[in-house]
Amino acid sequence: MSAQPHAAQAGTLHTIAVPARMRAAMLRRSLREHPGPTVAGLAGLLAAVWLIRYALRGDQHTLALLVGAWVLGWIVLPLLLGGGRGRVRPAHLRLEPIGGVPAATGLLAASAIGIGPAVSLVALAALPVHAARHGLAAVLVAAVGAVLLWLLGLIGSAIALEIVGHAGGPAGALLTGILTGTAMGVAGSLWAVFPWVSILLVGAPDRVVRAMGYVPSAWPVAAASGPSGQGVRLMATLVGVVALCAAAYLLLVRRVITMGVPFRPRGTTPFPLVRRDGDEPAARRATTAASPAGVGRPERGWRAWVPAATRAVAGREVRAWMRHPLRLQYLAFAVVYGALLAGLPLLSDVYLLLPWAGSLAVLGAAAMSAGLVGLDGTALWLPLTTPGGERAEVRGRALAWLALVTPIGVLLAVVGVLLAPDVDPLAALSTLPALLGAGAAVPVWVSLLRVRPVADPRHPTSADNPTDVVSVLVATGSGLVAAAPVLALVIWGPPEVAPLLPLVGLLSGAAACWGGIWLADERLTRRGTDVLAAAGQRSRPPETVLPLTWDAGWYRENTATAWALGLLTVGWIPVIPQGVMPLAFGIDSGWIVAGHLSGSAHTAVGLAMVGLGVAMLLTGLVLWDRRPRPGRS
Amino acid sequence: MITPALEIRGLVKTFGAHRAVDDIDLTVHSGTFHGIVGPNGAGKSTTIGMAVGLVTPDAGEIRILGHDALRDRGLTRALTGVLPDGLDFPERLTGAELLRYSAGLRGLHRVAATERAAELIEVLGLAKGAGTPLADCSTGTRKKLGLAQALLHAPRLLVLDEPFEAVDPVSAATIRRVLRRFVGGGGTCVLSTHSMLLVEQMCDEVTVIHQGRVAAAGPVAEVAAGGSLEERFVELVGADASGSAGLDWLTEAR
């Protein structure tokens, strides 16, 4: 009598185990073929060991913060690094006779098989290690809490990958942009972040302690070390959060396997097509091949100032910025990068850069717009078959960029100025129009000049990012050149010219914009078919393989490439620390050559350093661009 | 004498060492359907690309309705509607937004553009495609949307590269009717295709291109020379229509 339930139970268990076996097979193959996951796993293991070591004597709240960051990274990093590849997904079970609960359980079991979950489990052992100072019971409570946090990371990662990672939709793109912008912003502000991190590792400040009360990663140790009533409440809440996430994942899996459609965020609006009954269509009045109708009626208001074709391209571009995952990623990156570069110095009580938040974000947006033509594949054929389409294409792209980036730049600048009332914002605000002018037009020219087509224009992902370092540097450089007159007047000009700075910035921006549009017009009008052909070249030449270990033979055979790498690495030292820092910020520490001089000698040496660095970087770029590549004659 | 809608003389295009188009002459008379046929890689798309300005020729002349297409580009573009094959669209736009964008590029007034787009969407059965991003549209829907944008400004010359590829039979019949009405209204339609049946049904004249050269040109019946166009085509391109020999393992009785 009990045989049937047993058989059914065994069948369910077998079904649950299938995804796990699939995942194990995928992982084995992946480990055999690529060393990447193993190397990443070893690096993660080192970090986990450091975390456990810190837990032995470190601060409770800082540990909770680090553990929280670890779990968050586990959820988010696979989205950035393409961790969705090699995963067993709900869609894989769509044709199998399996229910929602066994499918979700099986998929989570499969997700648990991998280097990431194993290393995370080791890292979370830091919690019971830290709780050991409070006794055995505390260790057990913290260990249960660690397992719950591990489950939270596991389920959160599965949900994030299913909803965000595979959709390639706006949410995933924004998240990727925010994360990369944060990483680059922090990397660019290490001088300001390091002292704060040092303080945090010794003991969390009060505001951090208060905030950590609401973060789940703090609850296990708080439950282990606090009164028992509070401990029960915290652990029950943690169980509730995990259960809620599990229920959400179950719903997601059930939706995919029963409805047969993966979740996909919608970001489009239909076109109004309803025609009122009885209306005589205007088009019908004269829609013959001999006499096209509806052309050339005058427009009113602001529309009269912008040709219809330019408006059409600008409209297309604004929609593309709102919907294209890589463009959204670029925009989010620029905003976060600019805001952090200006804001993170606050950690060291430096307010000087806050008014520059807008300018830095605008410069970042210009840099990230230097490869947009390649993102659109061969869609350029439409303007190339339209009268005056080239001019409209160039101006429409610039106009849309201005319409999007100007409010962002102005808003960040205003916020920065308000947060730093004691810093003179004139220089920052005056460079803003210069940067906007250059950023609107020069990247259009650069992206027409160096077309790097994305492999799949229909469904691009972060992994297909075709950003080209030379294009980025040219676009950034053009912004700096446009801002140079304002900066030169700020540094060397007499105080009386200060009121003229906004006008100088405006004129510089207009000149840069005009120059960029002229160059882009020339390029597209004269070489439009070449640009189109380049945009259709989807197969890329094989990349240069750089040796990861010292290989004297390789360096002998690839002298130019080795020089390029060396110059591109070292060239920044004369530009930033030896040039810009003493000239613009008056930072003159021991190893800065100009710091040992004063007056005009100080300025001359600083400028010479910038010149030297720029020459090194340009030489490096030229050599890198001409490096011999396999398969290229 | 009526000016030809499209006149090509001595057209040449070389890619690297490969001469894709080798001294092609082509005349398309106004108010006619003209088919361009040829095997894969014969040079059809390159010829069409050069005619509409998407490929720069190495040598030769192109005249559209009497105007030099290489010099008076703005004028000839205004007279021409183009549906290329294998090129991308602005993939983030929906079908309806593509039509609005295309109308804007051509300088059509918003009201006229909206009404024309609505009519084309209705006639070509594009209601679903109109609200779907082009990146998510099927190949057939993309072809129909491409055709709609080519028709939107009521051109006098339509140049269509593989317009019926992946289009369902019902939609194909609709497109044929629309194109016949277009030609009946004084327009000229040039289309490249692999379907000889389609050319026999629709076209007044045909040009057979093989290895970058014109192998035959003229009225369809004249080129077919009393037989079917398909048999004549195989004969003209000198292909051995294999398939009669071998594969015994597939055909033997079980």
Image: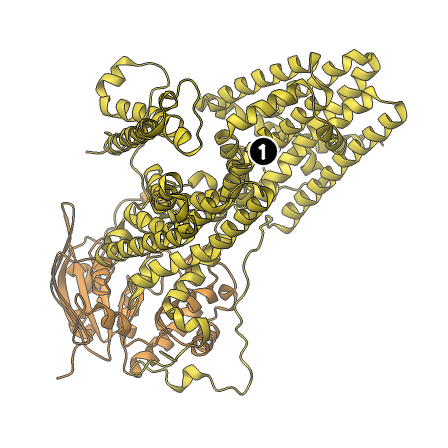
Residue B167 in view:
yes
Q: Quadrant of the C terminus of chain B?
A: top left
Mark 1 belongs to which amino acid?
Leu
A203, above or below A319, in the image: above
Q: Is residue A189 above or below residue B99?
A: above
Residue shown at the point (42%, 41%) measured from the top left: A465
Using the image as rendered, state which of residue A165 and residue A602 is in the foreground: A602
Quarter of the view holding residue A397? bottom left
Q: Is residue B55 left or right of residue A364?
A: left
Q: Colour of chain A?
A: yellow
Q: Is residue A167 left or right of residue B25?
A: right
Colouring style: by chain
The residue where tag 1 is placed is A346
- Spot occupied by residue A290 in the image (x, y as percentages of width and height): 29, 82
**Along the line of sight, which residue is nearer the eye, B161 or A84?**
A84
Residue A149 x, y percent position in the rendering: 71, 28
Q: Give coordinates of residue A551: x percent, y percent.
A: 30, 14
Q: Quadrant of residue A553?
A: top left
Q: Secondary structure at mark 1?
A: helix
Q: Is residue B252 visible?
A: no
Residue shown at 61% from the left, 30% from the top = A74
Q: Is residue B5 above or below residue A503?
A: below
Which chain did the image draw in orange? B
Crowd class of label 1 (few under 14; some 14 to 19; many from 20; radius 10 Å): some
Q: Position of residue B214 (x, y in %)?
A: 13, 62
